[in-house]
Image (cartoon, grey):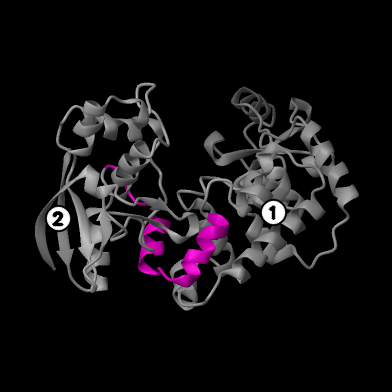
Amino acid sequence: MEVKLKGLTIRDLVKDYKDHAEEGISGYDGRLDIRPPYQREFVYNDKQREAVIDTVTKGFPLNVMYWAVRDNGDFEIIDGQQRTISICQFINSDFSYKDRYFHNLSDDEQEKILNYELTIYECSGTDSEKLEWFKTINIAGEELTDQELRNAVYHGSWVTDAKRYFSKNSCPAYQIGGRYLNGSAIRQDYLETVIKWISGNQIEDYMGKNQHKENAQDLWVYFTNIIEWVESVFSKYRKEMKGLSWGEFYNKYKSIGFNSEEIEERVSNLYEDLEIKNNKGIYQYILTGDSKYLNLRTFEDHVKKSIYEKQKNKCAHCKKEFPFNQMHADHIKPWSLGGKTEPNNCQILCQSCNAKKSDNY
C-alpha cells in the first residue's frame, strides 16, 4: 500500500458536509466518504467529542488520520471517522462547546478553527489492503469490538441492512426487545447476539454465507419471533429477564405448548421462595427443570460440622466413616418437595451416596 502525506484545513474538510442517515456521511465537497460500509457507527460521547474541539481551538496537533484513495480519485476514511464527525458536527452547530455553538463564535474565532490544518495520510491500495490497514490501525483510542471487525470483513448489502435493524440508537431491535438484551446496539452487541443465536454460535460462517444477500429480513423475522415467543410464555416482564439467552431457549423450546397463566403463577411463587438465591435462574429452571440454575441456599459450615459430629463422622446412608472434607451436606427432604435449608432437614453424605441421591431427584 502506498502512503502519502496530505495537509487539509477544516474549511476544506467540512465543505458540503452531509449526514445521509442510512446512506452514509460525506464531506470535502462530496469527495470524502466519512463512513464507508466497513466503518463503525459514531460512538464518541460528549466528553470525547468536546476533547476534539478543545484540541482544535487551542491549536494543538490532532492525531494523524488516514484516508484511502478510491479508483476514481475520491476518498474514504480508514481511521479518523470519530474525530472527523465531531469536527463536522460542531461546525454544523449540532452541539455546543463550552456553552457556545459555532455560529455563536466571533468571526476571528471561526476563522481560526476553519484554518486549522489537519494531518492526513492518503493510502492507495486494493480493497483487501485498505481493510487490513483499517483493522491494524484501529480507531484512535476506541478499540473495535469483535462484531465491528466482523462487520468490516463481511461488509456489503446484508450487513448494511442488518445494521439498520440492530445497530442504531433506538433501532427497531431496541424498541421491541431492548429490555431482553444486554449491551449496546451502537457497539454491535445486539447484532452479535442475534447472529450467535440463529447460527448456533457460528457467527463468521453465517455472515460469510449471507454477505451478498440483498437484505437481512430473515434475521429480523427470527428476532421478532423470539420476542413474540418470550412474551407469550412469560406474560409479565421482570428485570431479571434481561440478558438471558432467549434465542437459545427459543430454538430448543419453541414447539412446546406452554400455559402462560400457569407459568406466571410458578414464577411468582419462585420469586417468593427464600431458598432461591438467583432469581435470574428462575427462567432457565422453568424451561429446563434443572434446579442448578436457582443457586439454592446451602447449609452453613457450623451446621454441617454439628450434623457430622452427631452422625459420628459417618455417612447417613452407607454408614461408612469419612473425613469431613469428603462429606456433603444434603437436604433430607429435597427442595423440590418442599424441604428447607434448616438444621433439622440436614444430613451428611459421602460423595458417592450424595451423587446417587442427586440422580434420583
Q: Residue at x 54, y 53 (%)?
A: 190
Q: Mark 1 sits on what residue?
A: 356
Looking at the image, residue 38 lies above or below residue 125: above
Dot 1 and dot 2 residues touching (CB under 8 Å):
no
Question: Magenta stretch mostly in which secondary structure?
Answer: helix
Q: Mark 2 sits on what residue?
A: 121
Classify residue 330 by image quadrant: top right
Asked if residue 158 lies in the magenta stretch, the reply is: yes
Is disc 1 surrounded by few (<14), some (14 to 19) or many (20+) residues within 10 Å?
few
User: Can the viewer see residue 142?
Assistant: no
| Image location of residue 326, percent across then percent down | 55, 41
Magenta residues, start to end: 141-166
Classify residue 48 by image quadrant: top left
Q: Amino acid at mark 1?
A: Lys
Question: Which mark lies nearer to you, 1 or 2?
Answer: 2
| Image location of residue 226, percent across then percent down | 70, 60
Q: Amino acid at mark 2?
A: Tyr
Residue 33 located left or right of residue 19:
left
Looking at the image, residue 356 lies above or below residue 113: below
Q: Residue at x 60, y 67 (%)?
A: 219
The circle on residue 230 is none
Looking at the image, residue 291 lies above or below residue 305: below
| Image location of residue 264, percent across then percent down | 85, 44
Residue 119 located left or right of residue 78:
left
Say which of 106 and 335 sits in front: 106
Is disc 2 surrounded by few (<14), some (14 to 19) or many (20+) residues within 10 Å?
many
Say which of 274 and 171 sits in front: 171
Asked if residue 2 lies in the magenta stretch, the reply is: no
Q: Residue at x 51, y 54 (%)?
A: 167
Q: Determine the CA span between mark 1 and mark 2.
A: 69 Å
